[in-house]
Amino acid sequence: MIFEASRAKAVDKLNHFIENNLSEYSKLRNFDFGPDNRSNISCLSPYISHGIINELEVIDKSLKKFSFSKNEKFIQEVLWRVYWKGWLELRPNVWSDYLGELNNLRNEFEKEQNYLKAIEGKTDLECFNQWVNELKENNYLHNHTRMWFASIWIFTLELPWQLGAEFFMQHLYDGDAASNTLGWRWVAGIQTQGKHYLASEWNIRKFTNNRFQNIKLNEDSPPKVSKKSYALTKQEFNNPQNIEEKNLLIFENNLAFEITDFKENKFEKIYIVSNKNNNRSIKLSKKLLKFKSLLMEDQKKRLKDKSIDCEIIDISEIENIENYYALYPAVGENLDYLNSNIIKMNFLYRNLDLLAWQFCNKGFFNFKNYIPKIISSLN
Ligand SMILES: Cc1cc2nc3c(=O)[nH]c(=O)nc-3n(C[C@H](O)[C@H](O)[C@H](O)COP(=O)(O)OP(=O)(O)OC[C@H]3O[C@@H](n4cnc5c(N)ncnc54)[C@H](O)[C@@H]3O)c2cc1C
């Protein structure tokens, strides 16, 4: 499976999915038919996570094709990302604690054979080994497979979830601090305390069309327990009343300025901020860094085509720029860098996030109730 690094290809993929496969999405979405047959899901996450296309654009197109009720499942899935992001924004210590725990575990497991076999795809489980190779080769896994993978990692291979989440972040083209960290916490049973996700042989067989044999799993393990609990931190997210003509920084989560809420505003110059491995806690694979860099080049080209002055810079060069706004990079590696190196930032937030994040204080079932309101307010 190939993900081409351009907005044009992402829009083609979106249009093709809406026209041909959206109608069967809720019925077929849980099947992983293998990397050569992904038509039952959209495979848009590498693009949405980089802001190449955005959630509202996807929802808008889906609603032009089908009614809200026919599309409800798909729209809910698209907004899970926004929900996870908002949930983490309100409890940013979950991310910093995760990185701290990861740091300790890395040293402890550096030479641990079970761990090394797992990340090399050399376990006794054929399905797991195939998924490891698929992750490294295609930089993508189906959602159900991510759940099985994480569950096997934690409950059958008995490895710490933090290391598994790091492995995903190193390779997934859609690697995202919120969806990934909280997805792994959820499988382990510490996101919704006491409720874990246990993969089972029959479930894997059914939803992979019996592609795998000898699936011997620990199907009877209790959830993981965490002593840490996270209270809501009161975060204020506001945009300035008047946006002045300053410079603008955009990060890897907003690589299509032309579809942002600020596309009509005038900026002196746009700086596309790249973040290499030296300033990241989690070191990304070469392929993933290349994918990000191609998406940045593609953004630069589209801006230049519109005669907008722009430049790609390294995150360490921000200190040389004056008088700027920054499109909010969200909790994650880029924000960590800014928080530890730069005193004051003027962030601009997406309208979708400003609206939706206020409903992320509780669970997704509560958030779901606000989806019609969120969509109608922003249309
Ligand atoms: C352990 C684990 C780790 C994960 N790590 C990531 C990650 O790093 N980055 C990431 O983008 N997603 C992550 N997910 C969520 C989900 O698996 C992917 O977003 C989805 O598989 C992307 O494939 P798709 O675009 O074909 O999805 P589709 O089924 O076509 O869904 C459409 C869109 O909805 C959103 N979406 C769907 N399911 C989810 C979900 N569970 N959570 C958040 N958004 C969702 C995505 O933007 C996706 O592109 C993770 C899930 C698990 C269980």
Image (cartoon, grey):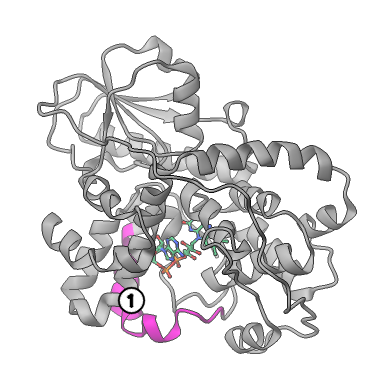
Write the start and end of the magenta stretch as one range. Answer: 11-32
Q: Quadrant of residue 25?
A: bottom left
Q: Quadrant of residue 187?
A: bottom right
Q: Amino acid at mark 1?
A: Lys
Q: Is residue 256 within the magenta segment?
A: no
Q: Is residue 173 above or below residue 346?
A: below
Q: Give the side of residue 93 with respect to residue 228, left or right.
A: left
Q: Is residue 34 positioned above or below 175 on the image?
A: below
Judged by its main secondary structure, the magenta piece is: helix
Q: Answer with the quarter of the image where residue 220 lies.
A: bottom right
> In this figure, which residue is indicated by the disc labeled 1?
73
Quadrant where the N terminus is found in the figure: bottom right
Q: Residue at 49% across / 46% down in the picture?
A: 230
Residue nearest the viewer, comparing 133 with 242? 242
Which type of secondary structure does the marked residue at label 1 adopt? helix
Percent x, y of residue 91: 44, 43
